[in-house]
Amino acid sequence: MTDSRPPVRPRPRPGIDQIRAYVPGQTVEAQGRSIKLSANESALGPSPKAVEAYKAAAERMFRYPDSDAFQIRSAIAKTYGLSAARILMGIGSDELLSALVRAYAGAGDEVLYPTATFPMYRIYTLATGASVVQAPHKDYGTDVDALLAKVTPRTKVVIIANPNNPTGTYTPKTELARLRAGLRDDILLIIDAAYAEYVEREDYDPGAFLVDATNNTVMSRTFSKIHGMAGLRLGWCYACEDIIGVVGRIRSPFNVSTPAQAAGIAALEDTEFQRRVIDHTRRWRETLIQRMKGYGLSVTGTEGNFVNIGFPDTPGRKAADLEAHLKSKGISTRPMAMFGLPNHLRITIGTDDEMAALMEAVEEFFAEGKA
Ligand SMILES: Cc1ncc(COP(=O)(O)O)c(C=O)c1O
């Protein structure tokens, strides 16, 4: 049947036509099971205390949430030794990253970030009408010199993910400071530290030290990863009060729901649960890395709740081949083409049972064709 309706006359702003919609991590079902290792969600789910707080808050759903999110901002400030006045809550860190780019870049401006990183940065940039500029990564990590070399008079925002999704590399504290020092004062530096809690390196800092020392740097954080609350949508950013005021003016007034605020406070307090998540993640991450290296594959970095694996250019042995094999076993992983790495596969750390199933399926894949 032909569509006889007239063509749509309103046209979106330039840039929007260039956006390919974000494709989230998929789920498959095969052999009576569905194991999702494709979206960097938490293997151990949320803290039971967060679930309890969420349920208790249900009674208050007829009231608008606290627009100021005072209690959760105070809890975050206390947990990390930060100033509550410099914290802003969002519907995931995603909302805040998008609002920051929208507030500080527009038509004619450039937003700069490395290659092989989180694809949403491209969407935020094009949606504002600004142009994307990417600096090559170095060994799959942020290359400060390459970023600085790409700065032009039109650069308004620089974004780095630290640790980086999908490569699992991290940028040491001294390199962060060198990046900031090399950027003009009128360029906003966004440090997206979604996976900060998984990093146990002495030379790592999520970025609060730079926020405190400057008035043009933002650190963003999330409850989606370590706290296992991706479905509830809760994130925050830390910046000087001027920047917080700017983003605060363009966000929806009741962006963060009452149950999300309550669950977030309980999750922050449950440090024992966080420790368990970190230990579980580290244990399986190391096992997975060793296994993959044992099969002759490469691993791009070691931080985060995922492992990004590079494959040889051999027919039948590429990233897409292992992905298809795992799919046939009901295990979904994440192909990395959208992230700029067409022959890499990212695997999120799952539960003990899920990881055991993964290891078995991977072993089968490498055993096949050996005979
Ligand atoms: C690097 C990075 N930044 C931000 C986000 C968005 O997280 P949130 O769930 O807080 O919106 C993700 C989610 O996967 C991510 O990987």
Image (spheres, rainbow, N blue to C red):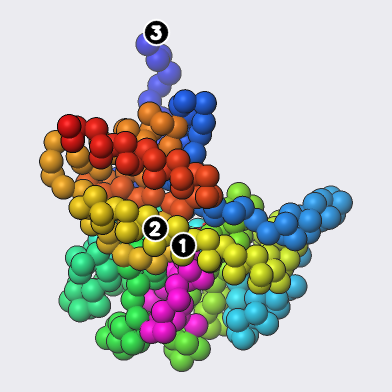
Label 1 element class: helix
Decide: is 35 above or below 193.
above
Q: Amino acid type of disc 1?
A: Arg
Residue linked to disc 2 = 287
- Which residue is at a point 49% across and 44% down the rendered structure image? 354
Residue 58 placement (x, y as % from top left) = 82, 51
Decide: is 111 above or below 42.
below
How busy is the neighbourhood of tag 2: few (under 14 within 10 Å), some, or many (20 plus)?
some
Q: Amino acid type of disc 3?
A: Met
Q: Which residues are magenta?
A: 188-208
Q: Is residue 355 magenta?
A: no
Residue 215 vs residue 346, the one in the foreground: 346
- Which residue is at a point 60% across and 65% down the rendered structure image? 276
Q: Which mark is residue 283?
A: 1
Residue 25 vs residue 291, the one in the foreground: 291
Which of the two discs, 2 and 3, sits closer to the camera? 2
- Which residue is at a point 44% across and 32% down the rendered structure image? 330
Position of 182 compared to 212: left or right? Answer: left
How far, Cα to Cα, is label 2 from label 3?
A: 55 Å
Is residue 109 among the parts visible in the rendering? no
Residue 203 vs residue 110, the one in the foreground: 203
Residue 44 placement (x, y as % from top left) = 59, 54
Report whether the residue tagged 2 is closer than 8 Å to ligand 1: no
Decide: is 210 above or below 98.
below
Locate residue 171: give its quadrant: bottom left
